[in-house]
Image (spheres, coloured by chain):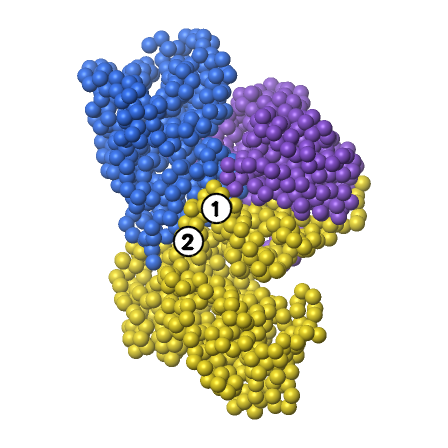
Amino acid sequence: MRSELHYDAVVIGAGTAGLVAGARLAEGGARVCVLAKGIGSTHLAPATIDVLGYAPDRVVSPSGVLPEFIAAHPGHPYAALGVDAIAEAARWLQSRVESGPLAGYRYLGDLDRNYLLPTAVGALRPSAIVPETMAAGDSADLERACVVGTRMLRDFHPALCASNLSRLGVPARSVEADIELERADQNALGLARHFDDPGWRAAFAGRLALKLQADERVGLPAVLGVRDPHGAWSDLEHRLGRQVFEIPTLPPSVPGMRLYEILRAALRAAGGRLVLGAEVISSERDGSRLSSVATHSAGHETRYAAPWFVLASGGFNSGAIELDSHWVTHERVLGLSLRGLPAEGEPRFLGDYLAEQPMSQVGVAVDGELRAEGAENVLVAGAALPGAVPWREGCGEGIALASGSHAAQLVLARSGAPAGAAA
Amino acid sequence: MATLSTDVLVIGGGATGAGVAWDAALRGYDVVLADRFDLAEGTSGRFHGLLHSGGRYAVKDPHAAEECIHENRILRNIAADCIEDIGGFFVTTPFDDPEYADKFMAGCRATGVDCEEIDPAQALREEPRLNPGISRVFRVPDGNIDVWKTVWAMARGAQERGARILPYHAVVAIHREGDVVTGARLRGHATGEELDVEARVTVNASGAWAGQVAEMAGIEGVRVLPGRGIMIAMNHRLVNTCINRCQMPTDGDIIVPMRTVCIIGTTDEHTEDPDDHHVPLAEVDQMLDDGEKLVPGFREARALRVWTGVRPLFEDAKASDTQTRDVTRAHAMLDHAERDGVTGFVTITGGKLTTFRLMAEDTMTAVSRHLGDERPCLTKTEPLPGSEDGATYTLGERLQRKEKNLVDEQIICECELVPRWKLEQAIQRRATTNLDDIRRLLRLAMGPCQGGFCIYRAAGILHGLDGLSAEQADDSLLDFLKERWKGTWPILYGDQLRQARLDDWIFQGVLDVEHLPANQPEAVAT
Amino acid sequence: MSTGAGTTPIDDLLRGSIDHCVKCTICESQCPVSNVTPLFPGPKYAGPQAERYRVADEPSVEWSVDYCSGCGICSQSCPQGVKIAEVNAQARNKLKKQKGYPLRDRIITRPTWLGRAGGGPMAPLANLTIDFKPFRIIGEKLLKVHRDAPAPEFARHRFSSWFKKHPSPPTGKKIVYFHNCGTEYYEPWEGQKVVQILEHNGFEVVVPKQDCCGLPLQSSGLFDDARKVVLKLARALVPYVRDDPDTLIVGNATSCTLMLKREAREILSLEHDPDLKLVSERTYDLCELLLELHDRGELKTDFQPVNEHIFYHAPCQQQGHFIGKPALDLFALIPGLEVTEGNARCCGIAGTYGLKVEKYDIAQKVGADLFGQIRGSGAAEVACDSETCRWQITHATGHKSVHPIDYLHRAYGL
């Protein structure tokens, strides 16, 4: 028996782009299924909405710089999407955060001005829209900071962070909190669970307060709760009597896990399906249209057929785009063409580590509507798109949000499904 | 300027130089060992780790084969903790001349290399990843040897007996008065400060650089031909036995399991410059193809890192300029008193890692004679520090130790199971800010993530120990990433490219190391 | 030098998959066990990381991998395709072989023995020992099964006896029913419902003589015995599907169907057994099958309203089928049925894991999130596809727990 299920739209990939596309399709009334090989980028990234950080100089106002940036980078996804689409997508996300499962949690900011937030090593990173739990770290008005860590969390080093911040003009010192954890190899998630517990928080704050000085804000690693970040953060601010901000560090990203929960809940609330562990291993075509994809479900394949597909499978980091040992690049999910490959005989990589690498802009070849070349019913979203170097430009979430939203809107418009809910 | 006085100054801290220092210290001499960089940063630290049984030379170079099997047995006794008893196979693949196998067996018998022919089906049971088309298999006593462990054990052992070990001290001049070499001037890398070493005998153990160092003493004609070869470390042990092609030695004919990885090598190209470490991409392809011959599916496996080592091939007679493999692999101990009329100076070069102890012994025999009191060599029987119990290393040791301290011990490099206390101890003992030095000592960042997670942790810990500024910690971090990239980009495909991309997201995305204070650009776009 | 018996190409398929690990920690973030106890360092550590230190013919040097519950959530979550849980299972097998198997692990892993011993006319007496505290305390001391571990009651009559007396009317549209030990010895009424639903949809149900799938043996690291048992089952089922390409095998126990679909082939290195391969291709979870029938317009949808508020928990080994949660789509067809979808990863029992005295507390902690969600949901009953999970849920919350198809059965009015 051929195992097959039919949907109005199938999304491949459950990172930010895929979940946004899936949720907005479902909200628009489409029967949508999100197929994911595994959990995506959300759990690894800081969960700030980076719209444009470096162009290549540091950007103070994304909305101010974007028109010029787009004109100078016509192959960038932003060129196809436009500033308004980015802004709309960001507003959509902010509203879903507010109405989502994490009570009281909000994302602050807009495209007009980047926050400049401390990183775990003490650099300053521009981000447009950030969790409220991070906003007080903005160096624009951070006069003095006390960076707090614990020897038990090997993934955060407050002294190095504080020293570098000071060198960058933000006076900062560090304090080691005394915290007992169940194991020496604790990660941020383990610590964050404790911060969800009011009793534990109270004891922690009581001990920390004794070490703090007047007029300094407290910076902690990004561990301010998984379930109840708003509660944890505001409780700490109240108990310590000062502003508190969290600093993203090595994965697992707790703020990222919160974002995943919010997006997943938005998808589910609108009736969308999510299938984890479902790697797409083949596809069937009908001329220039994709008709179905097959996943590697247990025992036998399961096919998912739909008139529309969104490919949000990621780039090289997920293996969706692969460079093999014969130096041939493939789009492994649907076999689509790629753009941005270095020419024959040109180097793929340069010996200077910090230089922009020739392979960094490779992505699925798309038309001006971000539809895949050769597959007119496949929209491409997120890191699978060519023309950007998101980790250097600081635009990863901006692309994911805007392209995921765009994909959903285009599919809804073209398939005659009921109009989507307003953002 | 400071001056040190010693009996023996050893220039070059690779296996041979450290071996000389150890031998000399055991004989009761005062020793100073100097290397321009970290110990074993040169050729010794860049080979594939094979402790030869001698099989490789059984047909082509019987003298070398005899030396190898002899030393193999000795090293298993004295350096047990540095050696893993992995055993070796010589296999005739469909790409090899089937007649060589019998010559091989005969050669082993003649040279004393233990060799047992086994059924290929048995070999495939033991090593299921091997090419199923192998027609003949011979078992030999190959092993692997952790050269950094060995070199540091010898250095520590010498130090315990009063030796002074000086990494990061380059020789800037060799002092010669008439026909007597009296010592050298060293310059410390960290501070630029110079110091003089007065030595009764100076040993030039600088391997591929021996010609350059000899010239500093005004001695011409020490012709060392650098032979550059690449090696690739694969992410996990595709095999647990050393696999050799049963044929005349050629490129890419060996896979050595070494700790958590396995290493394929190597090539052999003449180069003019012993510091030539560039990786020709054509050689990478060649290694991958060679890997496929031994382990089908090799190209699907994950390559972790590529590097080059430069063999010191001493030329006593004419040899071609391009193919250096055929120049003898025997070592050359040059007593310059006899050879050039210059006393107080001895050069040891050529050879291979497996025979380092013998090379050191030969050197010290001459040195001891020069010093006028021939003291006996003790290195055949004296165990290295850490190897006293005679138990060879097993791969599971680090896992076992972590399992014993599961909850209390914090691991910094998870891939290679390096605990925090070990890292802190190493940083303090070595007084170094160079994370690459620590890498060599502890295998920090040598696993699949190549430092993606542990280098930030290590930089933070480094900074936290007394005296280090944020600037120094940042430099250490960035220097490490740049150095690592050199060994990554030529083999960046498949899984390792996924990893590199994730590491980019972490370092440039989450941490934004490009915009640390030293790198902070002036301009800001509004 | 390496290896020895049991190393086949599939081992390399699992071991080879560790090359995909980029140490991203996603699996760690999802592991329900390592997140509640330091005794299990986590899937990244035990799987792709420790595997680089394992040599086939050298002894196992670890103990912590025994605390992996085998839930498989790590493999499901891994974005790179590392077969983490499967690698862990093999490492545990090696460890147990070396350490020796406690008596307990030879007994509780054989539900067929237990079922035959305690079921039927012996049931009332057997059930007394299960519920009687002093016997449970003795049991804990002797067998190391926790005194409070959820233990179901033996049924008076086996499912297969019922079916013998109620064979399906011949319709020509045959389907093979793999009922599993839980249905046979403890919940025969579930099997009756399955048969009735299938018959309602025009199937002629065939119930071959069958036994255990071997999953409990595999989870406890008794691989040789597990292989014998699962191959015996495969041989029993395969004659019914070999000749007709349209005949499927359907089961209501998602852990056991998963064993047939892939776990036996992957973990026990039975990739090349042709009978098991054919059986795995034809095996369907019941909800999976009904949903696909519905997608084709072949499912009867004459559902009467069922005005209930229920809570649905998808067991981790149902998620391991990689088909999402078909039960939810089936519930959506039933008028009046309000469903709260749980968002917890694991109930904790993990088959027989949570029965063991040294793991019971861990299992309870793992399930705490789910139990809290159930209590807070206001739902009266809990739907869950696996019987061991249902027993764990009832034990912890007091809520009645049934298979999702119970609501279909009710809605059909059967």
Classify 10 Å Cα crowding around label 1: few (below 14), some (14-19), many (20 and above).
Answer: many
Mark 1: which amino acid?
A: His
Find residue C348 and report its horizontal and vertical position in percent: 41, 28
Secondary element at image label 1: helix
Residue that label 2 marks = B397
Which dot, 2 or 1, sits closer to the camera? 2
Q: Is residue A2 left or right of residue C225?
A: right
Residue C390, above or below C25: above
Q: Is residue C181 above or below residue C26?
A: above
- For image coordinates 71% across by 39% down, the residue present is A146
Q: Which chain is blue?
A: C
Who's the residue at 36% across and 27% down the image? C254
The residue tagged 1 is: C20
Chain letter for mark 1: C
Q: Where is residue C150 in the image (x, y as percent from the top left)?
A: 35, 22
From the image, state the color of chain A. purple
